[in-house]
Amino acid sequence: MLFVADSAKAQVAEIKKGESLGDDYFVRVSVTSGGCSGLSYKMDFDNETQPNDQVFEDNGVKVVTDLKSFLYLCNTTLEFSGGLNGKGFYFNNPNASRECGCGESFAV
């Protein structure tokens, strides 16, 4: 399962409204090679699912990931932090053994 915090839910809704994205759009998250720690998160809006996608809905937000990325993202929570010291969207991933200082990449 992938989870969505209230803070991320509010920001997703605001972005979708600002960019005039319809209800058919969802959050797509994935893991790619790269970054200081070896793996990086990627997040986009999409409206087309792929054959091996894993689809979740939490807190009223539909989140989709590919099967390979799900192995790294299982039980991860998408969060959002705003303000002067805010990070923007970030992932609270219990599977990560370490993260880089900026929080953009991780290792398992």
Image (spheres, grey):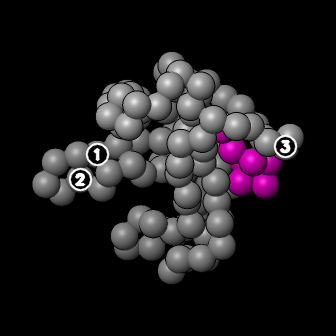
* Residue in view at x 78 percent, y 54 percent: 68
For the question of whether residue 76 can be seen, the reply is no
Distance CA(mark 3)–CA(mark 2): 34 Å
Residue 79 in picture, x, y percent from top left = 41, 41
- Could you say where residue 90 lies in the image, as x and y percent from the top left? 42, 51
Image quadrant where one finds the N terminus: top right
Q: Residue at x 53, y 51 (%)?
A: 43
Q: Are marks 2 and 1 in contact (CB under 8 Å)?
A: yes
Displayed quadrant of residue 12: top left
Boundaries of the magenta span? 64-71
What is the residue that sits farthest to the bottom in this orientation? 36
Q: Is residue 66 left or right of residue 34?
A: right
Q: Residue 47 placed where, x, y %?
A: 63, 35
Type of amino acid under label 3: Asn
Majority SS type along the magenta span: helix
For label 2, the residue is 86
The correct choice, above or below, for 16 with respect to 99 in the image is above
Q: Residues within 10 Å of mark 1 (few under 14, many from 20)?
A: some
Residue closest to the eye, 15 or 7: 15
As drawn, 54 above or below 105: above
> Disc number at residue 52?
3
Point out the tag, 3 or 1, that comes first from the N-terminus: 3
Q: Tag 1 or tag 2, which sits nearer the N-term?
A: 1
Q: Residue furthest left?
A: 84
What's the mark number on residue 81? Answer: 1
Mark sitting earlier along the chain (3/2):
3
**Relative side of 69 to 82, left or right:** right
| Residue in view at x 66 percent, y 29 percent | 56
Residue at 71% x, 32% y: name it. 55
Q: Nearer the viewer, residue 53 or 5?
A: 53
The three-letter code of the residue at mark 1 reads Ser
